[in-house]
Amino acid sequence: MPRYRIVTDTLAALSRKPLVEKLARVLDPVADDLESHREMYDTLTGESLTGHPIHPALVHFPIGITMGAAALEIVGLGRFTAATTVLSGITVATALPTAVTGLAEWTRGRPDTRQRHVGALHAMAASAGTTLSLLSFVLRLMRAHGAARIFLFGAAGAYGVAGFIGGDLVYGRDLAQDGDEEAV
């Protein structure tokens, strides 16, 4: 029995919820439109730039910056509000290109319903992280740093879940492009 079976079983159960299918149906036409613009699609998936996906490299920015800001909050006990404000803004700015490249990658798994659902669940978690980061950033600009911390820690948790699900997509569901497994 796999060591983290409870986590993967929970992920599988969540991916079967009707809300996830509804989100997948919303994403489908957007992904279709993106795929129809072949040059842009090839750039977003990394085909024309590097020959391998760009999304896995970009996810480190919103996730890592959010985790760094959360660490500063814990270690600094509120003394680094200017730094965490800047980091929250950078998180929001890096989330958009990360999301767009993720959508382009998601199109690869759409023929498989389970991959499609897990991809939609990943998008939900990442969107929650970005929304919470945006709220944290806005609250920081309003000098409501206490409330901003709560949203920051929520964003860190949501991005952590999104990262886990993204890893499951690539490694657990074999969504990697042909040849990617050799690079791992």
Image: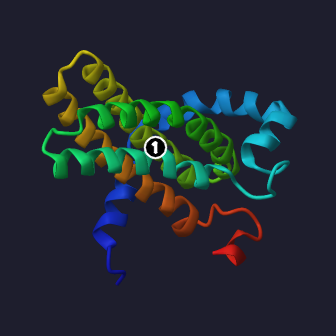
Q: Quadrant of the C terminus?
A: bottom right
Residue at x 68%, y 33% (from the top left corner): 31
Q: Place residue 17 in its image quadrant.
A: top left
- Can you give x and y, in whole percent of width and height, for residue 60 in the image? 50, 52
Residue at the outermost top position: 142
Q: Quadrant of the N terminus?
A: bottom left
Residue at figure coordinates x 51%, y 30% from the top left: 93
Number of marks? 1
Left or right position of 102 against 118? right
Displayed quadrant of residue 39: top right
Residue type (three-letter) at the residue carrying disc 1: Pro
Left or right: residue 105 versus residue 15 is right
Check the image and tell me how it is coloured: rainbow
Say which residue appears at 32% left-offset and 37% top-offset: 83
The residue singled out by tag 1 in the image is 62
Asked if 90 appears above or below 16 in the picture, the reply is above
Q: Where does residue 2 sit, x and y in percent of width and height?
A: 36, 81
Helix, strand, or loop for circle 1? helix
User: Residue 86, relative to residue 169: is it above or below?
Assistant: above
In the rendered structure, the answer to whether residue 6 lies left or right of residue 145 reads right
Q: Is residue 91 above or below residue 161?
A: above
Location of residue 53 by image quarter:
bottom right
Give coordinates of residue 92: x percent, y percent.
45, 31
Residue drawn at the location 24% of the way across and 15% of the way down: 142
Is 157 or 122 nearer to us in this picture? 157
Q: Residue 4: image x %, image y %?
A: 32, 74
Crowdedness of circle 1 by 10 Å Cα count: few (<14), some, many (20+)? many
Which is more toward the observer, 14 or 73? Answer: 73
Q: Is residue 155 found left or right of 50 in the rendered image? A: left
